[in-house]
Image (cartoon, helix red, strand yellow):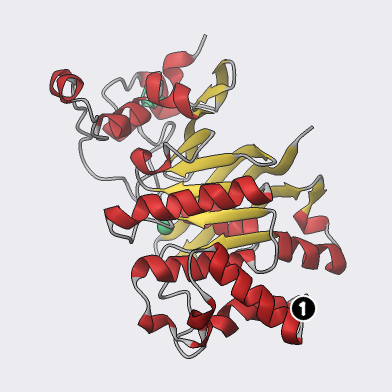
């Protein structure tokens, strides 16, 4: 098969005062080579933690991550080092993730050095090339991060990730902090790079409109678990989970005719605390369809149509 990354029953718990925070609670999905899987949910739903745990920035509490058919936790040092190179991350806040005391050239070159890819003139050429690839130029190599705009900084973050020739990139809200006018440029850059290099993305965002154009499939996350996962087009035209329906109803529709007739679903209340979340279905405190069973039994993610998965008792047979 064509699967590059498989996530199986992934769990990441944090011990905090007041209990155990189940940031990632039994999450499973797979991503095909060259595909973009969007991962969407409100802040605090565990999407960044999922990305970080996959990459290995956090150690998983349970479950497994399988990259190129090898479970990451079973990799020996040599294969693990290769994995560290093949799987990269682009961060939400490009400024916070760029060392302010390093030149752009050295920021991009750091990974090249760590992995011993190029030295001397070749290294320099590589850095210049990367700068051009992301829409900057070689004069930028000697400058510092504070001299750049938000969009340019994100381009530097992308060049840094690309420097070590990754196959898989977790894009953690890479456009959320940018001006709307810049967002499309960065999305286009990411899509062009994907096409050119055959990259695979996990693209994290807090709102469904941001992942629409870049994602082949989308997973919707709520309080540490996946509520729904399907093809991008299917999710937008036929959302099944009440939470997805509410999220989608908040996305503006360009056609004013349609926009006017549409019913908005307002979610009551805030996301409950991930420490001691509601029993059964974690969405039940905000769901207008909640039934008795919803407080007693945790709904499992089940395939209800071809490639369309949903975790909701409304779809129990
Ligand atoms: Fe609503 Fe119940 Fe479905 Fe949860 S399982 S989304 S509470 S209907
Ligand atoms: Mg986040």
Residue 181 horizontal/vertical position (percent): 29, 54
Q: Where ligand 1 lies, by quadrant? A: top left
Residue 278 horizontal/vertical position (percent): 37, 39
Residue 61 horizontal/vertical position (percent): 63, 56
- Residue found farthest to the top: 317
Q: Residue at x 79, y 50 (%)?
A: 71
Residue 67 horizontal/vertical position (percent): 75, 49
User: Which residue is under mark 1?
Assistant: 118
In screen coordinates, is 118 left or right of 8? right
Q: Residue at x 52, y 52 (%)?
A: 190
Q: Residue at x 53, y 47 (%)?
A: 191
Q: How many marks?
A: 1
Q: Residue at x 44, y 50 (%)?
A: 187
In screen coordinates, is 205 left or right of 271? right
Residue 79 in view here: yes
Tell me if residue 85 comes above or below residue 230 in the rendering: below
Tell me if residue 296 comes above or below residue 126 in the rendering: above
Q: Quadrant of residue 128?
A: bottom right
Residue 61 in view here: no
**Label 1 lies in ligand 2 vicinity (Cβ under 8 Å):** no
């Amino acid at each position: 098969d064509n699967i590059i990354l498989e996530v199986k029953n992934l769990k990441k718990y944090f011990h905090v005062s007041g209990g155990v925070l189940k940031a990632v609670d039994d999450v499973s999905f797979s991503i095909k080579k060259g595909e973009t899987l969007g991962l969407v949910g409100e802040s605090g739903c565990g999407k960044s933690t999922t990305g970080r745990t996959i990459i290995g920035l956090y150690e998983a509490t349970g479950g497994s991550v399988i990259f190129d058919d090898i479970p990451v936790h079973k990799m020996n040092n040599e294969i693990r080092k290769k994995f560290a190179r093949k799987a990269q991350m682009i961060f939400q806040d490009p400024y916070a993730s760029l060392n302010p005391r390093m030149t752009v050239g050295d920021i991009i070159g750091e990974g090249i050095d760590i992995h011993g890819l190029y030295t001397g003139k070749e290294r320099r050429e590589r850095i210049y090339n990367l700068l051009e690839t992301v829409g900057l130029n070689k004069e930028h190599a000697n400058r510092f991060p504070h001299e750049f705009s938000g969009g340019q900084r994100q381009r530097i973050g992308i060049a840094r990730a690309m420097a070590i020739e990754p196959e898989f990139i977790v894009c953690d809200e890479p456009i959320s902090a940018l001006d709307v006018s810049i967002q499309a440029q960065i999305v286009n850059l990411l899509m062009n790079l994907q096409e050119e290099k055959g990259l695979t993305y996990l693209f994290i965002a807090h709102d469904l409109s941001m992942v629409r154009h870049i994602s082949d499939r989308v997973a919707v996350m709520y309080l540490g678990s996946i509520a729904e996962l399907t093809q991008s087009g299917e999710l937008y035209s036929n959302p099944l989970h009440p939470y997805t329906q509410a999220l989608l109803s908040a996305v503006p529709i360009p056609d004013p005719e349609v926009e006017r007739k549409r019913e908005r679903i307002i979610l009551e209340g805030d996301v409950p605390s991930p420490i001691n979340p509601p029993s059964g279905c974690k969405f039940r405190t905000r769901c207008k369809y909640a039934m008795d069973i919803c407080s007693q039994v945790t709904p499992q993610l089940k395939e209800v149509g071809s490639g369309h998965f949903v975790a909701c008792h409304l779809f129990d047979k």
